[in-house]
Amino acid sequence: MSTMRDRLHTGEIYFPNGEEIMAEQLQWLDRLYEFNLTRPTEQAKRQAMLKEMFAEIGEGCYIEPPFHANMGGHHVHFGKNIYVNFNGTFVDDTHIYVGDYTMFGPNVTIATAGHPILPELREQGFQYNMPVRIGKNCWLGAGVIVMPGVTIGDNVVVGAGSVVTKDLPSNVVAVGNPCRVMREVNEHDRVYYYKDRKIDYDSLK
């Protein structure tokens, strides 16, 4: 029979406030608290701390404090060159996977934890967790919310304020609440970067 701690990563209903889980969680949250108190000039210290805090983190990742994570980042898996703007909230009760070069705008929330619809179970404090997977080279705009169990493909742009309740395929622009695919990334995007503004490739060399 699985323990409550075992159920963090199985999707089963469990009680998150038991002594064993809470003891570990508070240690990880203490470390996150320290990270959020670092100074902007302490870049090397921040990088070293993130390598301790996260399950995995590649080179060139930057997280702008304050950063919020239910397990202090202990269940977060980052590739390389990932950027998280102010107030990133990663509810990492189970695993969150993010691919290389993905960017998060301010106030983005990635949630893995959910609570049963049945009131009697919520009253007792039960929850369940479902992992979130986000591909490479994505951009999630300000205020995006990604719900438990969602998978987002590679090269996806999610518009600001969207609530992603279902999986998104690769190479699309998606917006809304609930978030829906608006269009594919296409040749137009090779010419224009914003409305009628053209990309000046020469100036980028």
Image (cartoon, helix red, strand yellow):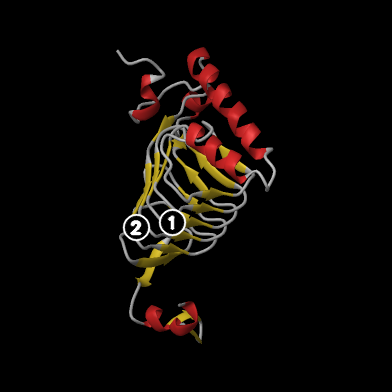
Q: Residue 98 at what x, y percent from top left?
A: 40, 48
Q: In the depicted view, which residue is nearer to us: 67 or 130?
A: 67
Badge 1 density bin: few <14, some 14–19, many ≥20, Cα 10 Å: many
Which residue is at 36% across, 20% downward? 6
Disc 1 from disc 2: Cα separation = 15 Å
Q: In the depicted view, which residue is nearer to us: 32 or 117?
A: 32
Image quarter in which the N terminus is found: top left
Q: Earlier in the sequence, mark 1 or mark 2?
A: 1
Which residue is at 43% across, 56% downward? 102
Quadrant for residue 161, please give it.
bottom right
Q: Residue 123 at what x, y percent from top left?
A: 54, 24
Q: Return the residue at label 1.
A: 102
Q: In the depicted view, which residue is nearer to us: 123 or 25?
A: 25
Q: Is residue 204 above or below residue 107?
A: below
Q: Are marks 1 and 2 in contact (CB under 8 Å)?
A: no
Which residue is at 53% across, 62% downward? 160
Badge 2 density bin: few <14, some 14–19, many ≥20, Cα 10 Å: many
Quadrant for residue 37, please give it.
top right
Please state which amino acid type lies under the numbered disc 2.
Leu
Please state which amino acid type lies under the numbered disc 1.
Thr
Image quarter in which the C terminus is found: bottom left
Q: Residue 111 at what x, y percent from top left?
A: 48, 42
SS at mark 1 in the image: loop
Q: Return the residue at label 2.
A: 168
**Image check: 99 left or right of 48?**
left
